[in-house]
Amino acid sequence: MDYGNLISSSFEYTKDALVGKWMEWIILAVPALVQAITFSLIQLLSGYVVRVISGRTPAPEVNEWGRLFIDGWKANIIALVYMIPAILVFLLLGGIGLIAGMATTDPTAAGATILAALAGAFLAIIVAIVMSFIALFALMRFAHTGSLGQAFNFGAIFSHIGRIGWGPGSSLSSYSSSSRSSTASWSVSST
């Protein structure tokens, strides 16, 4: 894994997009402010992130505001759907334990149920981390194909993750560095 190459290509991409282009900074600040002020109801910056993930080189222009809004909301929907397992684990294990702990007057039982609630919350965090990894691949499939349905093509997503690898020493980092230059591989494997 060549971390130096990964970092330098990321900085190069950002430099090409923004250094010396002060108007781009201002234009990028507008969607960020709008998204922050509206508590993420207007997803302009997320829509731009979808464009960047799609692998456009050079960095895409900030235009087509309607498309940014729609793609931002599609990205939110993808993230929410992939977080449902973590939410359910938290509600079922953590929430039930917490409710049971509040319903009892016995300090020992309350302590045990609070410990169960914390264990449920910890398990939900682990599930959320795993699902975030999978959701990132789903978001990349959506960004590269433009199809919301491809974000939920579980067979293709797991096949792609399997080719790259799940653990340390896998070629995941080498994929990340080449994602901008190999958009054709997504169109071939998007079935």
Image (cartoon, rainbow, N blue to C red):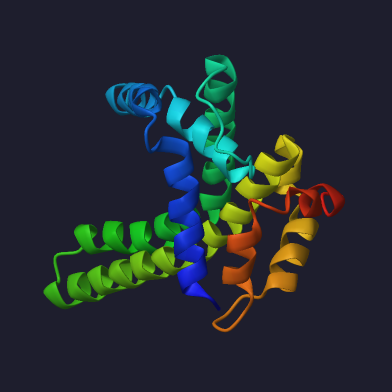
Q: Position of residue 42 (x, y in %)?
A: 43, 22
Q: Which quadrant of the view contains residue 50?
A: top right
Say if residue 70 shows up in the picture. Answer: yes
73 or 29, which lies in front? Answer: 29
Image height of 174 relative to 84, above or below = below
Q: Position of residue 125 (x, y in %)?
A: 40, 64
Image height of 8 relative to 78, above or below = below
Q: Position of residue 170 (x, y in %)?
A: 62, 79
Q: Residue at x 47, y 38 (%)?
A: 17
Question: Dividing the image into 4 quarters, which one contains the N terminus?
Answer: bottom right
Q: Is residue 94 left or right of residue 54?
A: left
Q: Is residue 62 left or right of residue 139?
A: left
Q: Position of residue 38 (x, y in %)?
A: 32, 22
Q: Is residue 181 left or right of residue 15?
A: right
Q: Which quadrant of the view contains residue 178?
A: bottom right
Say if residue 43 shows up in the picture. Answer: no
Q: Residue at x 48, y 73 (%)?
A: 3
20 or 119, which lies in front? Answer: 20
Image height of 120 relative to 49, above or below = below
Q: Residue at x 50, y 24 (%)?
A: 62
Q: Which quadrant of the view contains residue 101?
A: bottom left
113 or 72, which lies in front? Answer: 72
